[in-house]
Image (spheres, helix red, strand yellow):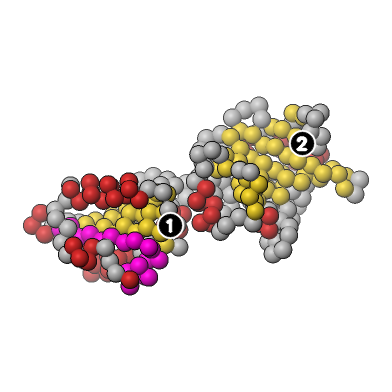
């Protein structure tokens, strides 16, 4: 994991001297036109280290990680390579400044390189600085370097799967401890299930028309929406509660009133979220009904 304002603890950080870089990662490629820049870029992953000379020693000034498979580079804030720019802004707020395609959060010690498709293509860390700089403690005593160099493949090896959380999608969904992840979570959506209930959430950016088409298609495949048309768009209280600018609600009972589905669609700015809650009537109990009521009242933007 790439720690903002620090680096890869135990391998290479912005508190290390460059000799440690050679011991841990081997000999880098250099460019005579760019002194004090070191490149580990012979494979799919790319690590670029910029050094600085002070106090008669060479120190690591910044570390940039890029390349490889989507999502293989991840920060301690949960932002991954390949994530949409919106994920960065939702996580950290507006950048302190923008330099070309770089979104700079200097006080946090991190800069995000943004590609032409508005996704994260590289992440740079360095010591936090400027007003309000976040304090990042120096790493503990380095690990035994007799282990020899680390390969970039080892550095960027996939992290153990983590439990997807609604907050990763930029939305709050009050899931009780009964809910467990269901299927594979991505930046565009996730699902959770408990006895009798399945919750699915999907998120998209600048997709209001696509969301409307999705809702219509979803409704076409289900029984009639039992919420009166005049109430489906919600009211000011619903928009205040969810933090949304636009809302849409649906309730679709299954055949003979079985296996109902609730739908909540909310939009704020360019971000849209669609959440469905399906209930298996045969497994309904008091806890199930309480979960559904809590979910419907607690969904909102973060």
5 relative position to 118: left or right: right
The residue wearing badge 1 is 269
Q: Nearer the viewer, residue 238 or 39?
A: 238
User: In the visual, does 260 lie left or right of 59?
Assistant: left
Q: Position of residue 99 (x, y in %)?
A: 66, 47
Span colored in magenta: 237-253
Q: Which type of secondary structure does the marked residue at label 1 adopt?
A: loop
For image coordinates 39% across by 44% down, the residue present is 184
Q: CA distance from mark 1 to mark 2?
A: 41 Å
Residue drawn at 90 percent across, 49 percent down:
55
Q: Quadrant of residue 263?
A: bottom left
Secondary structure of the residue carrying numbered label 2: strand
Quick check: 198 above or below 286? above
Q: Locate residue 126, reporting x and y percent.
A: 71, 50
Residue 110 location, x and y as percent?
65, 51
Q: Nearer the viewer, residue 188 or 151?
A: 188
Query: Is residue 163 shown above or below 174?
Result: above
Q: Position of residue 233 (x, y in %)?
A: 26, 63
Q: Mark on residue 37?
A: 2
- The answer to whether residue 298 is seen in the rendering is no
Q: How many marks?
A: 2
Is the residue 202 above or below the residue 67 in the image? Answer: below
């Amino acid at each position: 994991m790439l720690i903002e304002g620090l680096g890869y603890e135990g391998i290479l950080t912005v508190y290390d001297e460059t000799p440690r870089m050679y011991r841990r990662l081997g000999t880098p490629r250099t460019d005579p036109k760019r002194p004090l820049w070191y490149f580990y870029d012979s494979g799919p992953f790319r690590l670029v280290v910029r050094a600085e000379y002070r106090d008669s020693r060479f120190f690591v000034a910044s570390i940039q990680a890029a390349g490889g498979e989507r999502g293989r580079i991840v920060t301690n804030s949960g932002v991954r390579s390949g994530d949409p720019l919106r994920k960065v802004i939702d996580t950290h707020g507006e950048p302190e400044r923008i330099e070309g395609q770089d979104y700079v959060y200097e006080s946090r010690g991190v800069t995000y390189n943004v590609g032409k498709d508005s996704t994260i293509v590289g992440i740079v860390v360095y010591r936090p600085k400027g007003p309000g700089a976040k304090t990042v403690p120096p790493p503990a005593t380095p690990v035994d370097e007799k282990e020899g160099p680390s390969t970039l493949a080892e550095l960027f090896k996939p992290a153990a799967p983590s439990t997807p959380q609604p907050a990763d999608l930029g939305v709050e969904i009050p899931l009780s401890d009964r809910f467990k992840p269901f299927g594979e979570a991505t930046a565009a959506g996730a699902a959770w299930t408990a006895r009798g209930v399945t919750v699915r959430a999907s998120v998209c950016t600048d997709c209001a028309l696509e969301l409307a088409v999705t809702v219509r298609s979803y409704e076409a495949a289900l029984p009639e929406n039992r919420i009166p048309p005049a109430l489906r768009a919600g009211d000011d209280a619903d928009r205040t509660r969810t933090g949304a600018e636009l809302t849409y609600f649906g309730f679709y009972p299954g055949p003979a009133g079985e296996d109902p589905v609730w739908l909540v669609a909310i939009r704020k700015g360019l971000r849209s979220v669609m959440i469905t809650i399906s209930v298996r009537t045969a497994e309904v109990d008091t806890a199930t009904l309480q979960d559904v009521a809590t979910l419907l009242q607690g969904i909102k933007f973060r």
